[in-house]
Image (cartoon, grey):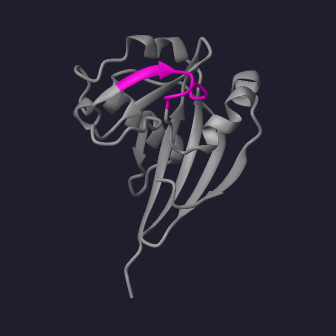
Amino acid sequence: MQKISFAVTCRAIIVDQGELFIAKHDPRNPHYALPGGKLEVGETLTACVAREIFEELGVKPRVGNLLFVNDWVDNRNHQVEFFFWINNTADFRRASITSSSHGFELVDTKFADPTKPGVIVLPSFLRDRFSKILELGNNYPAELIHSGTEH
């Protein structure tokens, strides 16, 4: 029997001027993801997203509402991801992975429209919901997503 790994992660939805802030973790992969990382034992979800974003980007986020919970399972992994709206989005225009303590974990960051051809953002449900995210922002009703082997 193969052992399944389990992780809880918290990610940031940072939208400014109609674009989503995305991060690339591996130069070999064409896709981007949202900044964030793993929950530590004893840490709250909002504290996790705030810590991870500050470590990776050097900007202290003002964490808003929970927008999505993604329950992702495949043959080797089970990951539960919490996606939080970030209120001070314009501050991330000056984010720098070269001057942050954990920026080395990322190879690129940028603002982009995930619905445009050539912009690959995982998880893919973000592309389908991006226009509604733009419209509702922090008022987007929390949604549970069940996804599979797309990661």
Q: Is residue 56 left or right of residue 9?
A: left
Residue 93 at x, y percent in the picture: 44, 12
Q: Which residues are magenta?
A: 109-119
Residue 95 at x, y percent in the picture: 37, 17
Q: Is residue 146 left or right of residue 55?
A: right
How many numbered markers are drawn?
0
At 26% from the left and 30% from the top, the residue drawn is 103
What is the chief secondary structure element of the magenta stretch? Answer: loop
Residue 64 at x, y percent in the picture: 62, 30
Who is closer to the viewer here, 33 or 119? 119
At 51% from the left and 54% from the top, the residue drawn is 150
76 is higher (above) or lower (below) than 121: below
Q: Is residue 47 left or right of residue 133?
A: left
At 67% from the left and 53% from the top, the residue drawn is 145
Quarter-of-image position of residue 99: top left
Q: Is residue 70 left or right of residue 58?
A: right
46 is higher (above) or lower (below) than 86: below
For the view shown, which residue lies furthest in the bottom direction? 1
Residue 36 at x, y percent in the picture: 43, 39
Quarter-of-image position of residue 138: top right
Instruction: Give yes or no for residue 117 being in the magenta stretch.
Output: yes
43 is higher (above) or lower (below) than 7: above
Quarter-of-image position of residue 134: top right
For the view shown, which residue lies furthest in the front direction? 117
